[in-house]
């Protein structure tokens, strides 16, 4: 019997080995096939295709994805695979400066007869960016060339930009969405209580609302009051610009927004007809009617469509701003500081204390750099990382070179911490800034664990021996020490602003405690010197440096081999997940759910202190 059992076991063991061998062979074969496919793709791929520009045609200004001032590095692996597989991919980011360069060049390019705005895939974009692009479009029209906007459906941000066009067309089945601005969040207090997470909250500033999502189930009255103030200021700007460009009365635009149901009833629910009768659009055209109209303007290409050139192809044929190395006779350096401020080295899209500090140090040591513009687009983050950057700014100023801050959509909290010592601060009228306040938030999980029957016990030589052991509650002395440290950090923040802005501490206190202001209000209060663009800030830095003939160039950290490898694979995986696995609607829902807390989860300040504003770059 033993021999029989042993024989049966040996048979199964042999079969198992055979199956394992087949599995390993199959996987190795598939892996080799993949490597062969990648190798042949790379060896035969030619990214530099000749760009053919028609003798006269429309520049199709396709603003696809988020509008950013510094792009995440491109993923060549994804580009090659998508090209080989015949997959059409849209850029997830478009460079803000590229848009301005293209519009400016097109105005003097005889081969460009008009601009066609393509705004269907427009992602996140700041109101200040839209205003500056609108100004560039206005300058383009001064050349005598026409701008046409045509969409099936206009999102609010797309319509704002389309309002700068000479002609706006809408699909007869389409609509124009103009709904106003809002600041809404999800609140997690009850959820945190149900999970029995003990969140220890420390903050200074009545209006410092960054932690409200974990402290409350609703927005506080203080937060509602200040949010409504700056939202109203920005919405007034939007409606004023649209009314001016479209020659509409404020009453008609207000009626369209506030009384949409009754307005629709007058046209039997026809949204396109309502947009036409209100004056938001100039005409209704089907796609074929639009193509025929554009053929009349530009002529017909070999495919029977209108003559055109895409934005990305056009960018390959024109010069780009700020990319040349510093000129020997004097250059203004530009450092982009975008995203949440975190400690250490951080990738593009996040402000690393060490990363930005190193770039500032590079500008200080470069004799060709005569002045520096720090372009800030951030709601803040780590106090320690912000101070590391500020310390580098102070060292830079010892060189005698001027430093000018140019604020983007937002430069608040930690973003203002690093701006305060600049020689001059520029902002747009719709920049969100201020939020001078500080907080700390430490979760402990002793109640969550006890609900599972898990407990923490032991002894230590001092009352602080357990330190920040998140499996047990904070000791009273530790709580007190954190609060004392927090007040010191807030006092330090006030002192930095007072010294940097030549204000008294009393003056700073009146605009502090977490209050947020639009750029125009911040200028009146002394937090901002001038209202203008990045180019204005560059010219200001040159004037302070005493140079008339100058160039401007970006100062960036080169990618390491490790960065490129990680970028290559992470980009490919991201493309696969977002295009084939995760529905876009689910991604949107997950993003909205996690937005209030995702940055807090990645905070890495060594002292746990943060100067952060949870209102991200405002997108229409």
Image: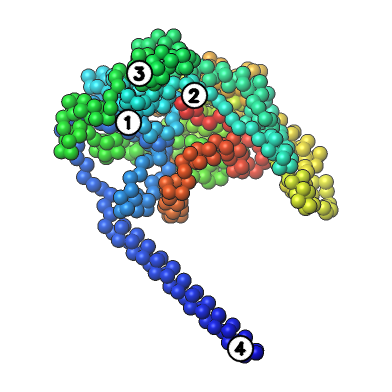
Residue 567 seen from this side: no
Residue picked out by circle 1: 118
Above or below, 305 against 543 in this view is: below
User: In this view, which residue lies farthest toward the front?
Assistant: 268
Mark before the other along the chain sequence, 4 or 2:
4
Q: CA distance from mark 1 to mark 3?
A: 21 Å
Q: Nearer the viewer, mark 4 or mark 2?
A: 4
Residue picked out by circle 4: 4
Q: Residue 595: horizontal and vertical position, in percent?
A: 56, 36
Mark before the other along the chain sequence, 3 or 2:
3
Q: CA distance from mark 3 to mark 2?
A: 35 Å
Residue 431: assigned label: 2
Name the secondary structure under disc 1.
Answer: strand
Name the secondary structure under disc 4.
Answer: helix
Q: Residue 325: horizontal and vertical position, in percent?
A: 35, 40
- Which of the 4 quarters of the picture holds residue 50? top left
């Amino acid at each position: 019997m033993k021999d029989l059992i042993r024989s049966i076991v040996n048979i199964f063991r042999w079969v198992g080995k055979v199956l394992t061998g087949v599995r390993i062979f199959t996987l190795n074969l598939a892996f080799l096939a993949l490597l062969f496919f990648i190798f042949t793709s790379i060896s035969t791929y030619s990214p530099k295709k000749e760009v053919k520009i028609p003798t006269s045609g429309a520049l199709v200004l396709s603003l696809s994805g988020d509008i950013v001032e510094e792009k995440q590095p491109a993923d060549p692996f994804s580009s090659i695979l998508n090209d080989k597989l015949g997959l059409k991919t849209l850029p997830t980011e478009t460079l803000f400066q590229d848009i301005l360069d293209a519009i400016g060049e097109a105005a003097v390019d005889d081969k460009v007869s008009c601009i066609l705005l393509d705004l269907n895939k427009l992602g996140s974009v700041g109101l200040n960016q839209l205003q500056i692009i609108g100004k560039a479009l206005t300058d383009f029209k001064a050349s005598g060339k026409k701008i046409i906007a045509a969409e099936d459906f206009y999102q609010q941000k797309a319509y704002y930009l389309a309002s700068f066009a000479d002609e706006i067309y809408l699909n007869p089945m389409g609509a124009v969405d103009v709904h106003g601005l809002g600041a809404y969040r999800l609140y997690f207090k009850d959820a945190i209580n149900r999970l029995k997470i003990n969140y220890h909250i420390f903050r200074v500033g009545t209006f410092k609302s960054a932690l409200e999502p974990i402290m409350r189930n609703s927005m506080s009255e203080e937060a509602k009051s200040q949010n409504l103030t700056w939202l109203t200021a920005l919405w007034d700007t939007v409606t004023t610009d649209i009314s001016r460009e479209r020659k509409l009365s404020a009453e008609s635009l207000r009626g369209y927004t506030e009384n949409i149901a009754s307005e629709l009833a007058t046209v039997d629910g026809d949204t396109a007809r309502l947009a036409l009768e209100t004056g938001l659009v100039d005409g209704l055209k089907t796609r074929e009617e639009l193509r025929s109209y554009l053929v009349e303007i530009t002529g017909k290409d070999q495919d029977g469509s209108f003559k055109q050139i895409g934005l990305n192809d056009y960018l390959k044929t024109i010069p780009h701003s700020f990319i040349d190395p510093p000129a020997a006779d004097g250059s203004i350096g530009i450092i982009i500081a975008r995203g949440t401020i975190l400690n250490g080295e951080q990738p593009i899209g996040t402000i690393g204390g060490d990363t930005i500090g190193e770039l500032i140090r590079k500008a200080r040591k470069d004799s060709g750099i005569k002045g520096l513009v720090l372009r800030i687009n951030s709601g803040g983050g780590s106090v320690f990382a912000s101070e590391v950057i500020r310390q580098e700014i102070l060292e830079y100023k010892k060189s005698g070179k001027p430093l000018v801050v140019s604020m983007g959509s937002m430069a608040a909290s930690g973003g203002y911490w690093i701006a305060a010592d600049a020689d001059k601060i520029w902002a747009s009228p719709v920049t969100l800034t201020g939020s001078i306040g500080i907080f700390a938030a430490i979760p402990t999980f002793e109640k969550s664990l006890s609900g599972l029957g898990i407990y923490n016990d032991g002894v230590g030589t001092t009352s602080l021996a357990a330190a920040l052991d998140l499996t047990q509650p904070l000791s009273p002395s530790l709580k007190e020490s954190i609060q004392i440290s927090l007040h010191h950090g807030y006092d330090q923040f006030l002192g930095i602003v007072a010294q940097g802005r030549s204000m008294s501490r009393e003056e700073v206190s009146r605009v502090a405690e977490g209050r947020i202001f639009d750029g125009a209000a911040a200028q009146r209060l002394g937090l901002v010197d001038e209202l203008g663009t990045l180019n204005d800030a560059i010219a200001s830095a040159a004037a302070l440096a005493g140079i008339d003939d100058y160039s401007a160039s970006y100062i960036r950290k080169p990618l390491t081999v490790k960065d490129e490898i990680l970028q290559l694979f992470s980009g490919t995986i991201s493309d696969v997940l977002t295009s084939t696995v995760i529905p876009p609607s689910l991604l949107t829902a997950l993003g909205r759910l996690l937005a209030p807390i995702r940055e807090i989860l990645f905070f890495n300040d060594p002292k746990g202190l943060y100067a952060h504003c949870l209102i991200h770059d405002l997108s229409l």
